[in-house]
Image (cartoon, rainbow, N blue to C red):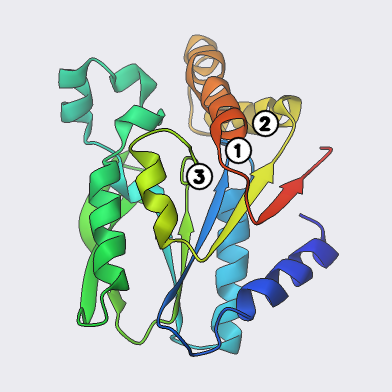
Amino acid sequence: MKLDQFEALLSRVDALMDGRQGRKFVAIAGAPGSGKSTAADALYEALAALHPGKVAVLPMDGFHYDDAVLHEMGRRPWKGAPDTFDVGGLRSVLQRLKDPSETRVAVPVFDRQLEISRGSARIIASDVELILVEGNYLLLKDEPWRQLHPYFDMTILIDVPEEELRRRLRRRWVWYGLNEEEIQHKLDGNDLPNGRAVIERSIEADIAYRSNR
């Protein structure tokens, strides 16, 4: 995302923090490798500087099914696909975060080094006014993902060409030490098909960024 695009996005998200009508939620979606996590982190840093203690990030990745569950489902090689997440769990957490009577909500965080989700690893306190919800499938039209949409006050989709996604994702999996066969499965058996699902089956976002590279 270019600097002028980011500044415009920051301005629009910041405008949500008007102190009225309770806590706000912004969904940031995109294909694997699109840069949505980087965008969410950058937004968080900028907004937290303007509103210390008033902004939090809720990554969808914290709601990965455990590997043992995925083995039972026969889906472990496709970890990261839409059906490998506890969408109901995410919806329940969003409901709790929406409830003004909840003073402290514990949320899970995905540990990429261990490849597992750590439950109750982060606390979101009641004085947080804006939550950036970040993840691939937040805007999918499919059930059960569509049940999340009413919680979002603003939706953002980051769309990157598949050739660029392939380049970025290959670099990621090389860094993680995967061999060529494992990388090919990750790319063509999982990541890129999942990325197509995001672009082809998501609702129209309030803000869409389409990059040429």
Return the mark for residue 139. 3
**Quarter that holds the C terminus:** top right
Q: Residue furthest top?
A: 181
Look at 69% across and 40% down and name the residue there. Answer: 159
Residue 112 appears in the figure? no
Residue at disc 3, secondary structure:
loop
Mark 2 vs mark 3, foreground winner is 3
For mark 2, what is the residue? 165
Q: Secondary structure at mark 1?
A: loop
Q: Nearer the viewer, residue 139 or 43?
A: 139
121 sits left or right of 43 in the view: left
- Crowdedness of circle 2 by 10 Å Cα count: few (<14), some, many (20+)? many
Q: Amino acid at mark 2?
A: Leu
Q: In the image, what residue occupies the spot 52% across and 25% down?
A: 191
Tag 3: residue type?
Leu
In the figure, 91 relative to 33: above or below?
Answer: below
Q: Is residue 22 above or below residue 41?
A: below
Q: Is residue 170 above or below residue 103?
A: above
Give me the residue at 71% from left, 76% from top. Answer: 11
Inspect the image, locate mark 1, and give the three-letter code of the amino acid beneath it.
Gly
Residue 9, horizontal then vertical, whole percent: 71, 67
State which tag comes first along the sequence, 1 or 2: 1
CA neighbours of label 3 inside 10 A, class few (<14), some (14 to 19), many (20+): many
Relative to the observer, which residue lies in front, 111 or 192?
192
Q: Position of residue 85 (x, y in %)?
A: 31, 37
Q: Quadrant of residue 206?
A: bottom right
* Badge 1 density bin: few <14, some 14–19, many ≥20, Cα 10 Å: many
Q: Is residue 5 left or right of residue 52?
A: right
- The residue pinned by badge 1 equals 33
Camera-nearest label, 1 or 3: 3
Q: Quadrant of the N terminus?
A: bottom right
Per the image, label 2 sits on a secondary structure element best described as: helix
